[in-house]
Amino acid sequence: MGAIHLKCLERWLEESNRNSCELCGYEFQVERTPRYKILRSIIVWLCLSQDEHQMYARSVKADLLRCLVVIPVTIACSYICVVAADFYAMKNYDNFPPARWTTYSLLSMMALLILSFFVWIYMALQYHQKAWFYWWQKSSIVKVVNLRLKNAALEIKNEKRNISEI
């Protein structure tokens, strides 16, 4: 495996998303340039078909649908907790101590609900951001900048040119 086309090597490094040889571990000096700018890459990534996409991420559409369901539920439950806590707080249940605990419990439950909602949103965004970034890196254009390989490629071209001149 001593001879390889430079273009083939660059494509292999691009497809494997590596900078080193899988067999011997030789580290190639490569230059990666993104194929798309950031905003365009997000749009392209979101428009990928499920077959192309499944390697990188679970369905973004499913998470958006979950978000559309969870947002109104979170708002409605928070509203109910606030109204119920206000009811128990306004009705001066001084003789009935569990009412005060009910108020505190409802407010605590609402805070926990809102916190868990934002944690879920944060985790989903982190997951999709990592999946997109991996795809964006993998879809970059790779150029080998190792001078020895470039010189060898130039020598081969020069030899072909010399042979064609004869």
Image (cartoon, rainbow, N blue to C red):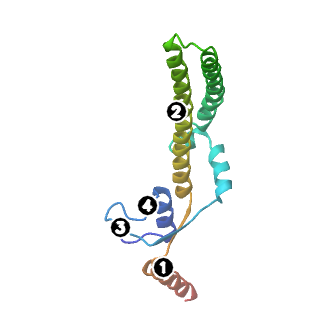
Marks 3 and 4 sit apart, C-alpha to C-alpha, by 18 Å
Residue type at mark 3 is Met
Mark 2 surroundings within 10 Å by alpha-carbon count, few (fewer than 14), some (14 through 19), many (20 or more): few
Sequence-first disc among 4 and 2? 4
Marks 3 and 1 sit apart, C-alpha to C-alpha, by 17 Å
Residue type at mark 2 is Ser
Q: Which residue is mark 2?
A: 116
Mark 3 surroundings within 10 Å by alpha-carbon count, few (fewer than 14), some (14 through 19), many (20 or more): few
> Residue at the spot x=43%, y=61% of the render?
18
Q: Nearer the viewer, residue 59 or 64?
A: 64
> Residue at the spot x=52%, y=68% of the render?
7
Residue 3 percent across, percent down from the top left? 40, 71
> In the figure, is residue 2 to the left or right of 122?
left
Q: Which residue is mark 1?
A: 150
Q: Which residue is mark 3?
A: 1
Q: Is residue 58 visible?
A: no
> In the figure, is residue 148 to the left or right of 132?
left
Q: Which mark is residue 18?
A: 4
Q: Nearer the viewer, residue 77 or 42?
A: 77
Sequence-first disc among 1 and 2? 2
